[in-house]
Amino acid sequence: MTLQVRHEGKSHRVELASDAVVRDLQAKLVELTGIRPERQVLKNGFPPKAMQIASASDACQAVGIKHREALIVEEGATGSVADAAGAPAGGDAGDSAPGLPDRQRHPRQVPAGLVELGTGSVERHVIPADNSCLFASILYGLRRHVVAPYELVPADLRKVVVEEIRRDPGTYDMLTLAECEKPSLEYCDWIAKDDSWGGFLELSILSEYFQVQIVAVDIVSTRMERFPHDDKVYPFRIFVFFDGIHYDACKRGEATIFRTESEEVSSEAMVVAIDLNSKKQFTDTGNFTLQCQHCWTKLRGEKEAQEHGKETGHFNFQECK
């Protein structure tokens, strides 16, 4: 049985056995979309209408899902299958390597119970400068969400980025070429290395992966960049601070995940950025000195470093005095 499944504007072909039951379809959809079975809303027909299915054990054909059927899959508070809460989500979590950040195993939606305003004021939580600061900052912001058995490390987030770009290299080509003049597949090899820095492309991809808005607070310009820009896409957000070359996490007391409609935390984060800017706690990327960690050449400013990278293929730079 072949189905045409549409999700978030993209069309996918799904193959099932002719005698497949709804649970088999749900497992495929978890792998494809990351939406857990109990939240899968299935729509078919024209105009598309939400299906109501009594049991995940029902045969697909018996509930109207036939060969060459076109289905739309969306995420909702309650899915189309009445008893889906007990359906297996594509196998035991132990079937995959521990910490593997695939969409089938990771709980993508942040539970509302983890979101709180916190006490005190917003402050910067310093992250080690080890070339993975962006990824570590995101994980710190989600530390109460990404817990056992789903604990992740920065290398796992690099895998998420690589996996997403390789899903659609043609679309990402123009983004990676604009960002660093690398075609998308070459960029995948580069960002997978633990000494490569992440940036806005990674913020965008990881926001979609974790289903949470990520707000980058730029200390240099005292501006905020939202990923995604629309505050209504996801109900919750985390913040990261950027000083020109380094990312740090953000917290308010013990809270790190906040509701997107709350402007109080946004205002306090901007106050922190303005204060850090006034104290010159940022890096002027146009005039700072970098040293290439491959050949030890000293370079002035981001432009010289980029030109050196193009000429030599070197990519690992550290700030120096």
Image: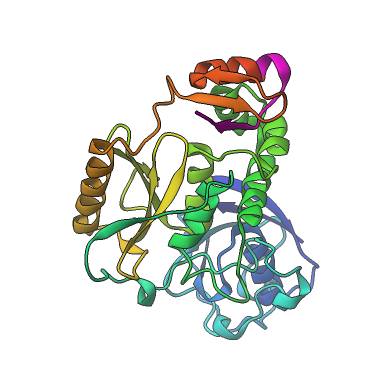
Task: Name the quadrant of the N terminus.
Answer: bottom right
Q: Please tell me which residue lies in front, 63 or 144.
A: 144
Q: Please tell me which residue lies in front, 4 or 225.
A: 225
**Is residue 224 shown left or right of residue 144?**
left
Q: Residue furthest front?
A: 321
Q: Is residue 307 above or below residue 144?
A: above
Assess whether residue 97 is covered by the magenta stretch: no
Residue drawn at (23%, 41%) of the image: 274
Image coordinates for residue 31, horizontal then vertical, percent:
67, 62
Mark yes or no: residue 277 visible: yes
Image coordinates for residue 154, horizontal then vertical, percent:
61, 54
Image coordinates for residue 79, horizontal then vertical, percent:
49, 73
**Is residue 46 shown left or right of residue 235?**
right
Q: Is residue 174 above or below residue 218?
A: above
Residue drawn at (37%, 64%) of the image: 256
**Splitting the image into 4 quarters, where does residue 28 fall?**
bottom right
Mark yes or no: residue 45 visible: no
**Is residue 189 shown left or right of residue 164?**
right
- Asked which colour scheme the image uses, the reply is rainbow
**Tally of marks:** 0
Image coordinates for residue 119, horizontal then vertical, percent:
24, 71
Q: Is residue 101 above or below residue 308?
A: below
Residue drawn at (69%, 38%) of the image: 188
Q: Is residue 241 above or below residue 43?
A: above
Magenta-tinted stretch: 310-321
Residue drawn at (60%, 33%) of the image: 172
**Splitting the image into 4 quarters, where does residue 86 fall?**
bottom right
